[in-house]
Amino acid sequence: MDKSSALEYINHMFPTETSLSGVEPLMQKIHNEIRRVDAGILAAVRQQSNSGTKAKEDLAAATHAVEELMYKIREIKTKAEQSETMVQEICRDIKKLDFAKKHITTTITALHRLTMLGTGKETEESNLLQQLSDACLVVDALEPSVREELVNNFCNRELTSYEQIFEGAELAKLDKTERRYSWIKRRIRTNEELWKIFPPSWHVPYRLCIQFCKKTRKQLEGILDNPQEKLDVGKLLLALQRTLEFEDELAEKFGGGTQNREVVNEIEEIGRGESDSRDVSDIRKKYERKLAANQGTETEEKDRNRDLSVPGAGFNFRGIISSCFEPHLTIYVELEERTLMEHLEKLVQEETWDVEEGSQNNVLSSSTQLFLMIKRILKRCSALTKSQTLYNLFKVFQRVLKAYATKLFARLPKGGTGIVAAATGMDGQIKTSDKDERVICYIVNSAEYCHRTAGELAESVSKIIDPQLADGVDMSEVQDEFSAVITKALVTLVHGLETKFDIEMAAMARVPWGTLESVGDQSEYVNGINMILTSSIPVLGRLLSPIYFQFFLDKLASSLGPRFFSNIFKCKLISETGAQQMLLDTQAVKTILLDIPSMGQQTSNAASYSKFVSREMSKAEALLKVILSPIDSVADTYRALLPEGTPMEFQRILELKGLKKADQQTILDDFNKHGPAITQPIIAPTVVPATPAIPSPPAGMNLASVGFIASREDVLARAAALGRGAATTGFKRFLALTEAAKDRKDGPFRKLFNA
């Protein structure tokens, strides 16, 4: 009871003040109850103590009784063993004699009956099979040579009728091969119950099948080597297929020689692999094949030392008969090669050289169809043989793929040839339409697909073929053929665009640069270049993979940049206004070229391309800045901006500026006197803080004395001001600098250009 309950109880017992007189009687009653309970507890404890002592005494008595019982049992067992020993000693000699008589009688009878096995009378007596089984146990107890002789005699007698039947003229034919295997299977099935008399350790059916396979191989070799009978491919393949099926049945029945490769799955993976990280994997697999070949040789050596009479001990039924077909499968390989070549011709003739819209890989159907047929032929051959014939067929695949690469190469647009092309200036030029460009892209993608899939084909064949032949399975030559197709196709694509630019380059040379009166918007030939690129580049970027589009961009930039530079020299006369207009056009062409990755929607690797374009187009800009320079300083400017230039180019620049021959000769003599290139070391300049605006110094003043920064970069920056439209002010400043340099041949400015 909690406090509240106790309080309620007290209030209930003593509700009034007068009722408190009953407290003493209640307390006395409670004390009496407590004493009664304590007495009961004490009595129970005493009783429990007495019961535990008695239980211990009873347990000790029971344990003693069990020990006495065990002792008596051991005594009885010992006496029984002694009695049994005495009885055995008494009856031992009598039992030996009795058993010896019985066994000798049974053995004589069983051995006599065992020599009669094959006769068909074994089932006439109910206990005869049991007696024969017992006789086999007796033979098993004798020398192993006795057992071997008995089994060999039995197998030879069983196969005597087989040799007689199938050596006759009627059944000794290739198309009767299946009947041989039916005979032995029927023989084993018929005598299965009878042959159970032999102990399982003898493996009689297994050894009978080995002898059958050896005799069958010998007979088939005679049929195949018969020069009077011409082999038919259909009959040859059918006989080989039935032989392989029979060997598989034997291998499954007796074990040993199981196939470790899933051939079908391996072949199906051809054409589904990825192209990245191929080089490292190819090298690794090449050495893995070599290691596997060496290990295979060691395994064969160990197998020869095994006991081949035991199933699964190393004897391989696969190939025991079918290997005799191997030297005669050349006609099969030739048939497959003819079929493949005919199929290839048909594929190329029916090729539309187009790809359906929405295609993921943009590959020509002829390439995928060709590999589908190769995979079907590979499946068919790998089901027949994995030895030399498969290797010969792989060589056929190589020849067919090389032929396909040749046909892809022949489909690429060709340049003009012959007398007419040479007379019209079209010799070597390649004209490509929009459709031609798409076809070239499809050829690039198809060649890449063939390059990758050929490698996967080689890997799959190397896993399927016998290990000693795997090292010779290589598609590197075929892959080189397709790589050459890819390179040629991309170069053709660039040459095709170059031919399209011919009209615009000719239009650029026809512009009257010497009579232009003002600088305007970019010229019409620049718009033509832009139209050509905006028409072709988006399609090429969509069809080509990033790596080949980048290769195309590099080739295009390395072509257009130098071509634009050299095309400037084809102009007749370039005035100052004309040079400024051409400089504006150069900037526009540069911008167009830099925008090509964006046009093709492939900007991931555009940094190196942009750097290359900027470097190539900067040469054209530098050439125009040299043309804009004053006559007196043109040689110094040429050395500074085009240090790799030639005297012939410098002379052409003077012609573009409109100088007469006499004036040109003076400048050329001075130019040749100081050398065509800048070879003298740079004098350390005096450096002062640069100012935002550079005032024009008075004529004849030493530039170093007024604190100009005499560095090559500053001079080039001032020269670059000519190409930003500038202008008259920038041009006047450059004139002032060159005038000062003219008066001081050995000043810092002159030495700067000679650095």
Image: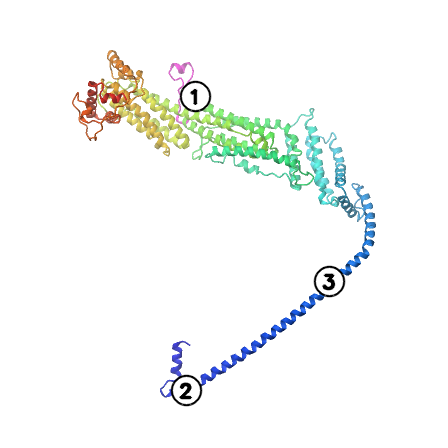
How far, Cα to Cα, is label 3 from label 1?
111 Å
Amino acid type at mark 1: Lys
- Give left or right: position of 755 versus 313: left
Residue 280 visible, this angle? yes
- Give left or right: position of 384 versus 701: right
Of callouts 3 and 1, which one flags the residue occurring earlier in the amino acid sequence?
3
The verdict on residue 295 being magenta is no
Total numbered labels placed on residues in the image: 3
Of callouts 1 and 2, which one flags the residue occurring earlier in the amino acid sequence?
2
- Residue 77's disc number: 3
- Residue 609's disc number: none
Amino acid type at mark 2: Glu
- Give left or right: position of 33 versus 4: right
Amino acid type at mark 3: Lys
Classify mark 2: helix, strand or loop. Answer: helix
Q: Residue 649 location in percent, x, y?
A: 30, 17
Using the image as rendered, state which of residue 605 and residue 190 is in the foreground: 605
